[in-house]
Image (cartoon, rainbow, N blue to C red):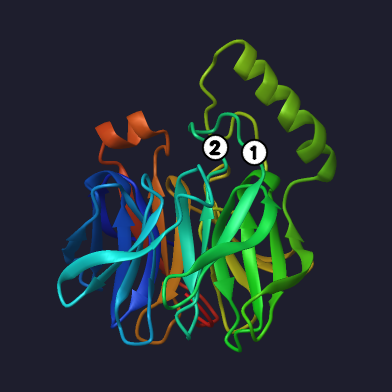
């Protein structure tokens, strides 16, 4: 079902199809890289404070989330510069990002200062093309992978710790409104009760939370949108990629060789699904091992919207 295209990554994130290549970040190689369909990897630029989400301004300049210092960097003409400083808007590590056709970016963050501990509802930040930043939405449970429809009028964002996809309408002024649950993966009873009870026990006993040990349901990490208005979700807790339609209907469910952290549609006709996998997202484990891989498979619908 899946074909291995690349391996020996520490932890891949933020895959984007751009200029006939897959662009992605590797947290612990501190680099943005490209991958062509022959499997050739090229390092584009180093980001010392960990790169994550990627996107492009209308003029072709590359925007890169710098996680640890909570900034967006701009890479233009082989030079790196500051595009926006988000550190006053969130104390938490910034993560994934979507950039629309006008160069407006929306950036999520972990909602926690520690991996998988003390996670709090947090904000989504909007950054305009000039680098001005403000909070666009609040009380999101780990805002993660995000897509924008081709007309630029709707956003769908994965709330990882709530196990759901949430949608917003996007106004002409880029403000978000009309918040709705687009697809639910985790039962409400589990989200409200069992997950928090187990997390409290782990905290009291000072145990390390292992992925999948608390949430046996699919959760959205990286996501991408197709022309059939389906959202492909990479689910690390269940090691699969799942295609959802609005309302939570599942049309496709593909088991992955390892935990699936991100996915992107691309290729010559937009129907190649790239999936980034790894053994673990726990920093100590991901830094010490090179278990990250990128797989491909062909799907029915082509890529649509942004990223």
38 vs 181, left or right, is: left
Q: Is residue 279 above or below residue 19?
A: above
Q: Is residue 174 visible?
A: yes
Place of residue 197 in the rendered image (x, y in percent of width and height, measured from the top left): 75, 24
8 vs 264, left or right, is: left
Rendered residue at 67%/44% (across/down): 121
Rendered residue at 67%/52% (across/down): 140
Question: Quick one: label 2, few (<14), some, or many (20+) residues within 10 Å?
Answer: some
Rendered residue at 43%/82% (across/down): 270
Place of residue 73 in the rendered image (x, y in percent of width and height, measured from the top left): 31, 63
Q: Nearer the viewer, residue 152 or 231?
A: 152
CA–CA distance in space, label 2 to label 1: 6 Å
Rendered residue at 50%/65% (across/down): 133
Place of residue 36 in the rendered image (x, y in percent of width and height, measured from the top left): 23, 72
The residue furthest right is 189
Place of residue 194 in the rendered image (x, y in percent of width and height, measured from the top left): 77, 29
Q: Earlier in the sequence, mark 2 or mark 1?
A: 2
> Which residue carries the number 2 mark?
112
Q: Is residue 46 above or below residue 34?
A: above
- Give the image quarter of residue 23: bottom left
- Give the image quarter of residue 223: bottom right
Q: Is residue 98 above or below residue 268?
A: above
Question: Quick one: label 1, few (<14), some, or many (20+) residues within 10 Å?
Answer: some
> Which residue carries the number 1 mark?
120
Q: Is residue 256 above or below residue 128?
A: above
Q: Nearer the viewer, residue 4 or 109?
A: 109
Q: Are marks 2 and 1 in contact (CB under 8 Å)?
A: yes
Quadrant assignment for the N terminus: bottom left
């Amino acid at each position: 079902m899946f074909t291995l295209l690349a391996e020996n990554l520490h932890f891949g994130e933020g895959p984007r199809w751009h200029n006939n290549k897959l662009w992605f970040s590797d947290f612990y190689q501190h680099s943005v890289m490209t991958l062509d369909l022959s499997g050739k990897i090229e390092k584009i630029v180093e980001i010392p404070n960990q790169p994550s989400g990627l996107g492009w301004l209308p003029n072709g300049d590359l925007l890169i989330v710098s996680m640890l210092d909570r900034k967006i960097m701009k890479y233009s003409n082989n030079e790196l510069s500051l595009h926006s400083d988000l550190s006053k808007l969130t104390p938490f590590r910034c993560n994934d990002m979507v950039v629309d056709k006008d160069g407006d970016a929306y950036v999520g963050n972990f909602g926690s200062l520690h991996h998988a501990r003390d996670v709090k509802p947090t904000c989504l930040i909007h950054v305009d093309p000039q680098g001005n930043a403000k909070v666009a939405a609040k009380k999101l449970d780990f805002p993660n992978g995000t897509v924008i429809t081709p007309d630029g009028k709707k956003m769908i964002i994965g709330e990882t710790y709530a196990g759901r996809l949430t949608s917003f309408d996007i106004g002409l002024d880029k403000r978000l409104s009309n918040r709705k649950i687009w697809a639910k993966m985790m039962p409400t009873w589990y989200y409200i009760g069992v997950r928090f009870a187990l997390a409290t026990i782990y905290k009291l006993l000072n145990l390390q939370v292992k992925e999948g040990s608390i949430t046996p349901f699919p959760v959205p990490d990286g996501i991408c949108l197709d022309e059939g208005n389906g959202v492909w979700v990479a689910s690390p807790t269940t090691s699969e990629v799942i295609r959802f339609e609005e309302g939570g209907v599942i049309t496709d469910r593909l088991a992955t060789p390892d935990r699936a952290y991100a996915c992107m549609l691309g290729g010559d006709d937009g129907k190649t699904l790239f999936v980034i996998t790894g053994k673990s997202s726990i920093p100590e484990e991901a830094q010490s091992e090179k278990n990250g891989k990128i797989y491909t498979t062909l799907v029915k619908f082509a890529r649509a919207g942004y990223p």
